[in-house]
């Protein structure tokens, strides 16, 4: 099992989970060129990805998706509302990639019978509950965030990996969904004091601090402390470059956990560099 957070933060997110022979990318929020290079550094050819799972449609999670679809014709999974909320340019690029994937030449179709588009096997896969993909069981779970239908993912094979970023707070159902994972990728977006005293305008501060914003370092720590079955490794993800610092995020979370007698290795993810666990 390999988890490589290729990039994480408000400027772009992408995570590779490789398990049981399957290779899955969660979010494609950095350029396709960067994704291709970052995957190559993990010894993964982007063309061999089994799928891209999207958490939500915000730009820092989908920016590289159109080009990635054009190059590799990868199937894309997410909630229906998220797929429908993708920028039109991305939807068009994926539709074009779907069309070139068709195995039946358009000329074989009788116009009034089946339109050429009928031959298209869409690369967009709307999902609601758990589904199987390349031998893995994948469960999307809803998270509170200001997007159409944002989710985290629980990915189960020989091991269990949960990816949970971009959420205002940890609901009971989120807690149940991330419980019992071997590896947890969890948002530690900001230090509440840094944010409150920082230079962001108040409406933006209010958005981040709100129930549909982003998770504070302390909230991430307490979410872990309250788990029944805790992970053996944690990635702290989606750190704000403005309202957090890697050392502060790590220290805050580890201090709260230590106070509860808990010790778990913390891996702080980066915006411009991959952080991995094999
Ligand atoms: Zn984000
Ligand atoms: Zn977001």
Image (tube, helix red, strand yellow):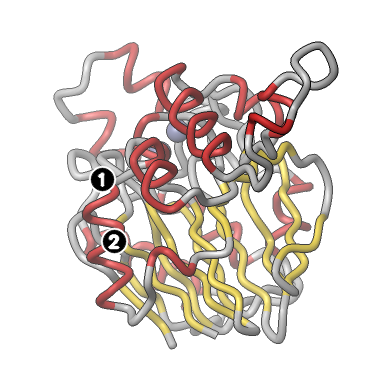
In which quadrant of the rendered view does residue 120 lie? top right
Q: Residue 36 carries which label?
A: 2
Name the side, left or right, on which 134 lies relative to 165: right
Residue 236 position, x and y percent, is: 40, 62
Residue under numbered circle 1: 31
Q: How crowded is mark 1: few (under 14 residues within 10 Å), some or many (20 or more)?
A: some
Name the quadrant containing residue 158. bottom right
Residue that lies at the very extreme toward the left in this rendered image: 199
| Quarter of the figure with the C terminus | bottom left
SS under mark 2: helix
Q: Residues within 10 Å of mark 2 (few under 14, many from 20)?
A: some
Left or right position of 2 against 189: right
Q: Position of residue 231 (x, y in %)?
A: 61, 77
Q: Which residue is drawn at 52% across and 40% down?
A: 100
Reading the chain from its start, which is encountered first: label 1 or label 2? 1
Residue shown at the point (37%, 49%) measured from the top left: 71
């Amino acid at each position: 099992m390999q988890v490589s957070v290729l990039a994480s933060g408000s400027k772009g997110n992408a995570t590779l989970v490789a398990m049981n022979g399957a290779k899955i990318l969660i979010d494609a929020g950095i350029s396709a060129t960067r994704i291709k290079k970052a995957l190559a550094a993990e010894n993964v050819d982007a063309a061999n990805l089994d799928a891209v799972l999207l958490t939500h449609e915000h730009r820092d999670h989908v920016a590289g998706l159109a080009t990635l679809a054009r190059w590799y014709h990868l199937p894309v999974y997410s909630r229906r509302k998220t797929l429908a909320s993708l920028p039109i340019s991305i939807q068009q690029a994926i539709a074009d990639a779907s069309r070139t994937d068709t195995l039946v030449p358009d000329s074989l179709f009788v116009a009034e019978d089946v339109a050429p588009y009928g031959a298209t096997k869409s690369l967009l896969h709307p999902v609601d509950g758990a589904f199987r993909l390349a031998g893995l069981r994948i469960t999307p779970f809803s998270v509170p965030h200001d997007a159409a239908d944002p989710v985290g993912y629980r990915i189960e094979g020989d091991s269990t990996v949960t990816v949970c970023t971009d959420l205002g707070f940890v609901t009971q159902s989120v807690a149940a969904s991330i419980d019992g994972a071997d590896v947890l990728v969890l948002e530690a977006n900001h230090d509440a004091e840094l944010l409150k005293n920082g230079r962001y305008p108040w409406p933006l501060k209010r958005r981040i601090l709100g129930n549909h914003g982003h998770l504070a370092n302390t909230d991430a720590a307490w979410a872990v402390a309250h788990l029944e079955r805790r992970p053996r490794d944690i990635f702290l993800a989606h750190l704000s470059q403005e309202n957090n610092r890697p050392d502060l995020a790590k220290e805050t979370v580890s201090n709260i956990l230590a106070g509860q007698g808990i010790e778990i290795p913390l891996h702080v993810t980066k915006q411009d560099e991959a952080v991995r666990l094999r």
